[in-house]
Image (tube, helix red, strand yellow):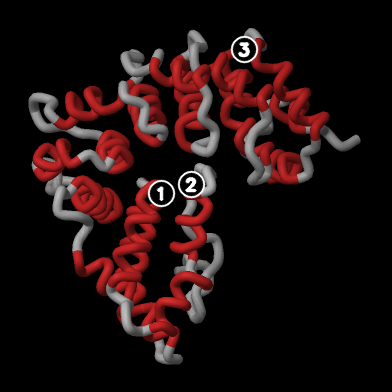
Amino acid sequence: MVMGVAELLLAGRAGTAVFAAAVDAADASDVAAILTLATHQDAGVRRGVAATLPLLTHGAPPTGSMVAVAVRLARDPDKAVRDHACFALAEQWREVDTPALREALADRLDDIDRGTRSEALVGLAYRHDPRALPRVHEALSRPGGVVRRLEMVAAGALSDPRLHELVLRHQEGWGTAADARTADVVRRLTDPAGPGADVFDGVAGLYRRRAHGRPDGDTLSAWHLMEEMLDIAPHRAGEFLDAVLDRLIGDEAAGREVRERSALAQLADELARGSSLRRSVDEPPAGQPGSSAP
């Protein structure tokens, strides 16, 4: 007998290959069964529900019932349940923005668990909730200078120049190269002077090369940097697009390459039409399997 997602979760088999296969094959009945476990007396089961719900959307937006359950679990007595639920609401479902979701995140800004606090903060920052700015300012001003990565990401998501001087204090001392790069991305996003001419010049050069049949060369590095900025602050796609196009004035072929074929223009258009998207790209560029497509 084939076990469903909820049955496997109750059997303690979350995280196994069998569970992953069941999640991939899950349908509406599996979702309904998982939702009923949100009030289970075992905190471990509730943690499993909070962690599994985002996987059951299969890339589509979550249903209202899924969001409502995650909102409830964000107030769970168990801190790990709250952390998983806030991660889903704040980051995995960034395209969802409702008053109830925002309130659930705001309620966790003073949570005893700092991971949950950080998720709540970045979730509000992604949605440009006014409660995020003073909390980010407070985090970056913390005595002792200890700042968490998600607090820096929240600063970048807000892209508020008033945070720039504080962000500059936290450019050193990160434990990994990835975190150090995130700090640099946030520095650029909060800079009152803009993200940097080197990025826009490099991306413009990439499309100029492609429009005229030349290899990408080292211009892809500028695109990847822009991509990281747009992942944190997608609302700036229109601004970035204009800056790139300004550099291509007089080169109609390159301008057309950007306007008609670039993921940057696609994101800017989707945002202009009111879509709140998380990712800027979803296909690999020529010669770069598995990378994001400019």
Residue 241 is situated, as x and y percent measured from the top left of the image, at 37, 62
Check the image and report above or below for 25 versus 224: above
Mark positioned earlier in the residue sequence (3 or 1): 3
- Which residue lies under the disc numbered 2? 278
Specify the amino acid type for callout 3.
Asp
Of residue 3 and residue 112, the one placed in the foreground of this image is 112
Visible residue check, residue 117: yes
* Type of amino acid at the residue the image marks with label 1: Pro
For the residue carrying disc 1, how many other residues have a C-alpha within 10 Å: few (<14), some (14-19), or many (20+)? many
**How busy is the neighbourhood of tag 2: few (under 14 within 10 Å), some, or many (20 plus)?**
some
Q: Residues within 10 Å of mark 3 (few under 14, many from 20)?
A: few
Answer with mark 1 or mark 2, whichever residue precedes in sequence. 1
Which residue is located at x 77 percent, y 39 percent?
26
In this picture, is 143 found above or below 258? above
- In the figure, is residue 195 to the left or right of 60? left
Residue type of the residue flagged with mark 2 = Arg
Apparent side of residue 125 relative to residue 260 in the rendered image (left or right): left
CA separation in Å, label 3 and label 1: 39 Å
Q: Which numbered dot is residue 234?
A: 1
Kindly indicate whether the residue at mark 2 contacts the one at mark 1 (C-beta within 8 angstroms): yes
In this figure, which residue is indicated by the disc labeled 3? 42
Secondary structure found at label 1: helix
Q: For the residue labelled by badge 3, is the local secondary structure a helix, a strand or a loop?
A: loop
Between the residue at mark 2 and the residue at mark 3, the CA separation in whole angstroms equals: 33 Å
Q: Position of residue 60 (x, y in %)?
A: 66, 43
The residue sitting at 52% across, 67% down in the picture is: 290
In which quadrant is the C terminus drawn? bottom left
Q: Which corner quadrant of the image does residue 105 belong to? A: top left
